[in-house]
Image: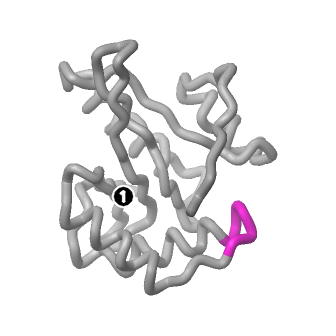
Amino acid sequence: MAITLRAARREDADTIAGFNVAMALETEDKALDTDITTRGVNALLSDPSKGCYWVAEVDGRIVGQLMITYEWSDWRNGVVWWIQSVYIPPDFRRQGVFRQLYEHVRKQVEDDPDACGIRLYVEKDNRRAQATYEALGMSGNKYLVMEEIL
């Protein structure tokens, strides 16, 4: 299976939004509003300062995605790249799609003098995803993410 990676384009917005809706339902049992999610995807695709999406394709079909957002770290005088909105359709899992996306992002971070690392958050009960991230060299840390979504 030949996997091609590329930056997402505006015409990918519906697929990406659909993947985001599927991921939220699968991982958090949360039903996202498709219209709001599509507008959010389009907002990011229209404004690179918000981040970017990378997609994986097989035979012209998008079979995986991840989103990058940026966080300035004054402690490191650099930018941390946050991986978010990861989704691989079930029929393409365990075939190296995420590994290729991750390694692509990791190489970009290594080549960017302003970048200092990669982070992501994962559901605390999602042991399978945690094992995948650990196999790629990531490790847990001592921080707990707190939030208030308004």
Of residue 115 and residue 22, the one placed in the foreground of this image is 115
Q: Main secondary structure of the magenta part?
A: helix
Left/right of residue 141 with respect to residue 116 in the rendered view: right
Classify the position of the C terminus by image quarter: bottom right
Q: Is residue 61 above or below residue 27?
A: below
Q: Is residue 85 above or below residue 113?
A: below
Instruction: Kindly identify which residue carries mark 1.
Output: 56
Classify the position of the N terminus by image quarter: bottom left
What is the magenta range? 25-30
Residue at (36% x, 58% y) in the render: 56
Q: Is residue 31 above or below residue 81?
A: below
Residue at (60% x, 66% y) in the render: 23
**For residue 81, which quarter of the picture?**
top left
Q: Is residue 35 above or below residue 21?
A: below
**For residue 46, which quarter of the picture?**
bottom left
Say which element carries label 1. Answer: strand
Q: Crowding near pointer 1: few (<14 within 10 Å), some, many (20+)?
A: many
**For residue 6, which quarter of the picture?**
bottom left
Residue 51 x/y as whole percent: 29, 50
Residue at (37% x, 29% y) in the render: 80
Left/right of residue 112 with respect to residue 5 in the rendered view: left
Residue 63 x/y as whole percent: 44, 65
Of residue 91 and residue 116, the one placed in the foreground of this image is 116
The stretch drawn in magenta includes residue 13: no
Of residue 123 and residue 128, the one placed in the foreground of this image is 123
Number of numbered discs on residues: 1
Residue at (71% x, 47% y) in the render: 123
Of residue 64 and residue 142, the one placed in the foreground of this image is 142
Left/right of residue 53 with respect to residue 125 in the rendered view: left
Amino acid found under the numbered disc labelled 1:
Ala
